[in-house]
Image: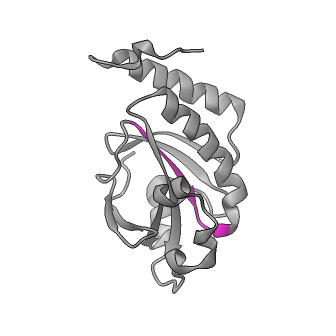
Amino acid sequence: MRFPRVSGSTLDGRHISLPGGFDGDPTLLVVSFQWQQRSLVDPWCSVADRLAERYDEFEYYELLVVDWRSRMLVGRTRRADLLSGDQHERMLVLRVNKRQFRQSLGLLGEETIYALLIDEDHVVRQAAGFPSSSTIEGLLSLLDDWDAARPTTSQSSNSTG
């Protein structure tokens, strides 16, 4: 399925168009709908940090999806100050019709978070909730296959264990 064309912003207010604004090939998106879901977001970001060290082209972002009518200004709250510099740079806020956004991606609800692997504007893998070992192994296998299929790669010097 294709990732919807939406606009978001960084916490410092810079606008970004998605999915074209994603730097990774592929890109992991950790999607949350409430700030209180940080306890589910952080483990995915730890996994993504390890993947980014292993795969040169891989990138990840956190997407905090808020309703377009919300008056919440995430970038100006004290909560955003609690993020580390790297987390702050990777977080994007999407002000969209949340119901339409969820439906376009087949996301069932807002009670949990979702991890979406995007390649060439398409969602190629999707997981909900806490990252399980089988989900992580599946991501590693998929990324290993993509990395091996690249015509030119600098990964040959990286260890695979």
| Residue 152 position (above or below residue 26) | above
Q: Quadrant of the N terminus?
A: top left
Q: Residue at x 53, y 75 (%)?
A: 74
Query: Going by the image, does 83 lie left or right of 65?
Result: right
Q: Which residues are magenta?
A: 26-35
Q: Main secondary structure of the magenta part?
A: strand
| Residue 79 position (above or below residue 144) | below
Q: Nearer the viewer, residue 106 or 138?
A: 138
| Residue 71 position (above or below residue 100) | below
Q: Quadrant of the C terminus?
A: top right
> In which quarter of the view is residue 36 placed?
bottom right
Q: Nearer the viewer, residue 159 or 2?
A: 159
- Magenta residue check for 65: no
Query: Going by the image, does 156 lie left or right of 32?
Result: left
- Magenta residue check for 34: yes
Residue 134, given in percent of the width and then of the height, sits at 68, 28
